[in-house]
Amino acid sequence: MKRRVLLQLGIPLLILCALFLLLAYPADRTLRPQPLLEVSVILRETDASLWTNARQGMEQAAMDLDVELRFLTPAQNNDAAQQAELLEREASGGAQAAVLVAADREVLAQTVAGLSGKLPVVSLETDMTHDGAVCFVGTDNQALGRSLGEAVLHGVEKGGTVVLLDSAPGDNAVTQRLAEAQSVLEAAGRSVAICRPEGDETIAQALESILAQTDAGAVAAFEASALETAAQVRTGENALLLYGMGATAEVAAGLEQGKIAATAAQNEFAAGYLAVAAAVESIRNTDGAQSQTLPFFMVRRENMYDPDYQKLLFPVTQ
């Protein structure tokens, strides 16, 4: 008798549980993992390690947002034509979005515009939103250039000469920063010498050559890799003041050792993370993603260990 009562109570309860599970997990919803989103990252330099901090941010975003990243570099530094070819290839190869660090906006504009509606492109470092990119992630390059120029003014007297490193010729963030710094310096009575590698000449060779010919009081670089190179060239007791842009481990070491007077630093980790997040948003939302203008800060040896600046120079401590 007792067993019959238990069966009478238990069977309906089991049926109710089964109905609940069916309602909670309808037929068109499976428990199988969804396929990863495919995002291609196209850098402008052959050495991807120069983007270590930004790449860490990208990889963290990929883990958080279920993304498979594909990092691509041109065969030669700042080869915009090859970047265009890589974009076309990734669009036809199944990539769902791309993050582009443009070497030359003018060369890439037609390709980016032609991919509108096919492959969402997020521009990192150089703003290409007027050329078809869905959004931009990076600093205000003109403001950064002006700030660097103003910083150099404190180290070079009126009438003195400043060498500016044009390490990435073309219409890009580096040249925008350089142009603004040059304008500030010349308006304040400083002479400017542009250092631009020619042919197979390296940045280090070009810098050594111009320093041998110029009575310069300071050198300014406008990207992290060029700043690292300049710090290696800058040796001797009467070494020049060195200013630049970047927040890598090598730049932090240069600040600590007194090789670098000041650097304009942004949160590279955040830039990488936000770029991938924007790419994901552009895949999932037909309206695209919002541009993100990131702040930058002038960091010197005396303030590099302030808590806020430590996070910029040493992202692993975040």
Image (spheres, helix red, strand yellow):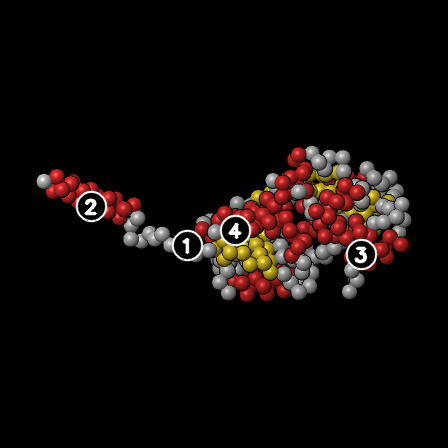
**Residue 34, disc:** 1
Q: For the N terminus, which image quadrant?
A: top left
**Residue 15, disc:** 2
Of pointers 1 and 4, the one earlier in the residue sequence:
1
Q: For the C terminus, which image quadrant?
A: top right
**Residue 204, disc:** 3
Q: How far apart are marks 1 and 4 (CA)?
A: 14 Å
Q: How far apart are marks 2 and 1 (CA)?
A: 30 Å
Give amino acid for label 2: Ile
The residue at which mark 4 appears reads as 62
Label 2 crowd (10 A; few <14 / some 14-19 / many >=20): few
Q: What element carries label 3?
A: helix
Q: How far apart are marks 2 and 4 (CA)?
A: 41 Å
Give amino acid for label 1: Gln
Q: How far apart are marks 3 and 1 (CA)?
A: 48 Å
Q: Which residue is at a point 89% across and 54% down the rendered structure image?
A: 212
